[in-house]
Image (tube, rainbow, N blue to C red):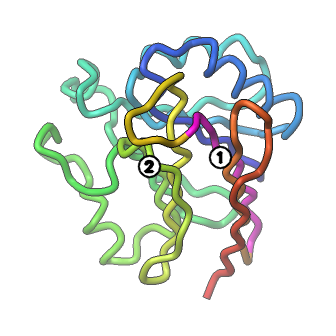
Amino acid sequence: MRLGLVSDTHGELENLREAARRLVREWRVEAIAHLGDECEDVVVLEEFPGPEIIRVPGVFCEHYRDPAIPNRLVRELAGHRVLFTHTPTSHANDLPGDPKPEELVARREVDVVAFGHTHVPLVEERDGVLWVNPGHLKGQDKRGHAPGFAVVDLAADRVEVRLVDLAGGVVTTHFVWERK
C-alpha cells in the first residue's frame, strides 16, 4: 500500500494542492493522511478523487477539543499498525482518553508513528518503531526546512519512506525499515 503524508499546512492551500497533485498523479498513492495544523485545509484533498483521506486535527485546532473527532488514530495498513497523530508525544491540549503516543510505543501497540507538529522532516527507527514526519507545507518556515511531504510504501515485511521536496519533487531522504 502506498500512503502520502502531509502536515502543518497552516492555510497554504496552493502548496497542499501541489503536494496532493504530486501524490495522486506521480506517486499514485492509495491514501493521503493530513497530520494536522490547519485541519480545515483537508478540503483541498477532496479535489482529488481516488485516495482515501485520513485526518487528525492539530493541537491548536478547535476540532482537537471535540471529543467526537479522534485526535489520534491507529489503523492497520498492509499488516502494520500505524499511529496518525499531530504530536509525537502527549500534549497539554489532549482530551481525557486520548491515546498517548509514548504509551502505545512502549507497549508495542504500533509499528509506525506518523506525526507532524515540529515542521522538521524526519524518518528514523527508535526502539523498533518507525517514526515519520513529512515536515510542513508552509511557504516560509522559521525552522529552515523547505516545504515537503512523505511517500510511504507499506509491505508485509518492510516500510519504505521517501521524504520529497515540494518545489522540485526531488526525494531528499530514502529510508527502508524492515520488520524485526
Res. 51 image quadrant: top right
Residue 43 vs 3, above or below: the answer is above
Instruction: Tell me which segment is drawn in magenta.
Output: 146-156
Point out residue 130 in the picture as x, y percentages from the top left corner.
Answer: 53, 69
The amino acid marked with disc number 1 is Ala
Q: Which residue is mark 2?
A: 115
- Is 102 left, or right, of 142 in this rendering? left
Tag of residue 150: 1
Q: CA distance from mark 2 to mark 1?
A: 11 Å
Which of the marked residues, 2 or 1, is nearer the chain's N terminus? 2
Point out residue 27 in the picture as x, y percentages from the top left corner.
Answer: 84, 40
- Is 28 left, or right, of 140 in this rendering? right
Q: Residues within 10 Å of mark 1 (few under 14, many from 20)?
A: many
Give the prevailing secondary structure in the magenta stretch.
strand
- Is 63 left, or right, of 176 in this rendering? left
**Camera-side residue of 125 and 67:** 125
Can residue 148 be found in the magenta stretch? Answer: yes
Point out residue 139 in the picture as x, y percentages from the top left corner.
Answer: 53, 22
Res. 103 image quadrant: bottom left
Res. 13 image quadrant: top right
Q: SS for tag 1? A: strand
Residue 99 vs 5, above or below: the answer is below
The amino acid marked with disc number 2 is Phe
Can residue 30 be found in the magenta stretch? Answer: no
